[in-house]
Structures are given as C-alpha cells and as structure tokens.
Image (cartoon, rainbow, N blue to C red):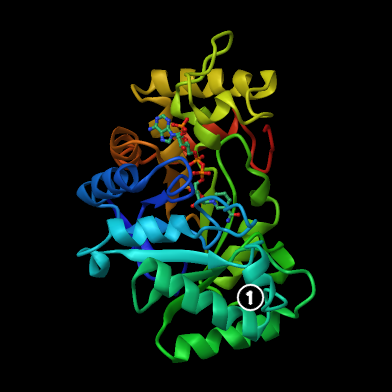
Amino acid sequence: MRYRTLGARGPAVSVVGVGGNNFGSRLDEEGTKAVVHAALDAGITLFDTADMYGGFGESGGARGDGERLLGAALKGRRDDVVLATKFGMEMGPEADQYGRRGARAYIRYAVESSLRRLGTDRIDLYQYHEPDGVTPLEETVAALREVVAEGKIRYLGCSNLPAEQLTDAFVSTQARYHLLDRGVENDLIPACLRHGMGLLPYYPLANGLLSGKYRRGQQPPPGSRLSWREGWLTDAALDRVEALTAYATERGLTLLQVAVGGLAALPAVGSVICGAMTPAQVTANAAAAGWIPDAADLAALDTIVTPGERVV
Ligand SMILES: NC(=O)c1ccc[n+]([C@@H]2O[C@H](COP(=O)([O-])OP(=O)(O)OC[C@H]3O[C@@H](n4cnc5c(N)ncnc54)[C@H](OP(=O)(O)O)[C@@H]3O)[C@@H](O)[C@H]2O)c1
C-alpha cells in the first residue's frame, strides 16, 4: 500500500481507502468487521463514513449504524487509522430539533453524537456532507473550528460544495469522480489545487460498474448494486467500459486496476475510497492501486473518456 498526504495540509492516508456506506445497511456487524479487518490487513488506513449511513428506523430517523458498526470493527486499532465521518445530511426528527445543519447548535449535537456512536474521543476528518443552503459558510467554519480547538476534531473537510465555495479552512472535499465521469476536472479540481485541498472521489468504481463484473447483454450478478440501482448500465457507459477493458487487457491489467490506479494518479486525488461488500473485494481494491500509470498511459486514457467528460 502507498500512502500520501491528503491535499497540502491533511493527514497521511492510504492511496486506497474504504467507503462505509454499506455498513449497517447492507452489511451487519459481522460483515462489517470482515471488510474492515481485510482492509487493515491490506494496509488501508482511511475509513470514511457518515452520521446518516446505516439505514433509517421506523420513526424516520437515521439509525447511526454505519458509524456504530465501523467504530466497533476498529476496536483496538483506532490509533492505526484515519477515521473520517460527515454531518449535514437529513437525519430525521431528533436531529431536526437542533435547527440549521450548518449552524453551531446543530454541529455541537452532531459531533457529540458521532463521537458516541464511533466509540472514540476524536474524529480525524470531519466533513460537512452538503451545504444546508442558508447558513453562511463562515458561520459553519467558525463553529467547526471551536470543536477543533477542543481536540475533538483533527482536520476539517467538506463534500458536495461547488468549486466557488471551496475554502482553505478545509483540507479536502468529496465529489462524484470516476473514470466514466470526469466532470469535476472542469472546475472543482482546479479549485482544489488552488486551495491545496485533496479530493476524495465518491462512487470511484461507478457503483461497481468499473469492477469488471458487469457485461453488456448479461444480467447483473444477483444482489449486486447495479441489479437494483438504476441509470448506470447504459449503452454509452457499457461502450466505454468495453474500451477501458481493452485498454487494460493491452497492458496486462484488469479493469479494476485501471479504475483504481488510474483515478489515484489524477491531480488532487488523495485516496480512492472504494465501497466494498466482502473481504475479497476490499483486498482486490487495495491491490489495484499497485498499478501506477505513466504519462503515456494517462494520455491514452484521455482518448477513451476525455478530461472533463461525463458519460454516466
Ligand atoms: N460525500 C457524498 O455525498 C458521498 C456519496 C456517496 C458515497 N460517498 C462515499 O464514497 C464511498 C465510495 O462510494 P460507493 O461505495 O457508494 O461506490 P463505489 O465505491 O463506486 O462502489 C462500491 C460498490 O462496488 C462494488 N465493488 C466494490 N469493490 C468491488 C470489487 N473488487 N469487485 C466487484 N465489485 C466491487 C460493491 O457493490 P456490490 O454490492 O455490487 O458488491 C460495492 O458496494 C462510499 O462508501 C462513501 O463513503 C460519499
């Protein structure tokens, strides 16, 4: 596993991380533990979750199981990892009592709740999941800095913020980015580079489409994400998957290696936070970053999906 600094000012992270949005929803405690332990064995140090991951209960409130199960799986290994979580998306009636999600009262409630669920005394990277649309960003940042000063947060990050709102207060941002959607290269990545921020691409495998397990004319594997998530297995996307697969084969690689190693090599990318359902998936994702494209490889990749292009 390779390690690098997240942006210019962030923590050191593994080039492949684990995205935790299956934990507590599609994976139970044992399943989560198996994925997390395989990740640790592969040298992965970055684990990303959110307060609203892990499903919603009957009252309409987020159960918080994503954080709870990740925290439990990391027991005894807390000091070995960079634990990243997020706040600011809809959590349901209890959280709604605290008002605007970018304001101080809400942030204090959200931090304490995440610390409790994660079973830790500090969050390494605390990310504003999406802007609430009303609170000035300066107010949100000031409230977050108070919590940093108290030692409960080490680094601040954001997510889903438009390029023009990025600020040096954050060490990183998250945005949708994979080899079939290079839209962030138009404005967000240049802004990240100007601010010295790292990018944590979400859907880095295009929800599994870039893992190699989906083929034109074949049914998706039973239970796989794209067997129920619509809008991804389009003809346009499958055309480019075929072109990327040919590119991989020419170089003696798998599509997964191209998807992970290729993305990790693009400017501003800090860590490729792949989601996983099984230990075998996480082990394969970690190994896939072993491929480091050279300038000619990257130029050839640009002829398949051009910089800035969105295919799916
Ligand atoms: N900031 C935001 O708004 C935001 C939004 C979305 C996600 N995120 C973060 O980004 C992380 C990554 O995104 P994601 O997990 O949604 O999408 P992803 O990484 O593109 O896809 C994950 C899915 O791909 C399949 N997969 C993974 N490795 C595989 C392998 N080696 N072989 C075959 N299939 C494989 C698995 O699906 P199967 O079920 O088919 O096995 C897995 O659930 C999330 O976990 C979350 O932490 C953030």
Q: Quadrant of the C terminus?
A: top right
Coordinates of residue 179 in the picture (x, y in percent): 55, 37
State the residue at coordinates (34%, 36%): 278
Q: Residue at x 54, y 87 (%)?
A: 145
- Can residue 10 be seen? no
Q: Is residue 197 above or below residue 299?
A: below
> Residue 157 placed where, x, y %?
53, 70
Q: What secondary structure is found at the residue carrying circle 1? A: loop
- Report which residue position mark 1 lands on: 167
Residue 272 in picture, x, y percent from top left: 44, 49
Residue at x 55% of width, y 41% of height: 178
Question: How many numbered dots are placed on residues in this image?
Answer: 1
Placement of 142 over or under 269, stated as above or below? below
Decide if residue 38 is in sight here.
yes
Residue type indicated by callout 1: Thr
Is residue 257 or residue 251 the one in the foreground?
A: 257
In the rendered image, the residue lying farthest to the front is 58
Residue 126 lies left or right of residue 101; in this view the side is: left
Q: Residue at x 52, y 15 (%)?
A: 215
Foreground residue, 48 or 285?
48
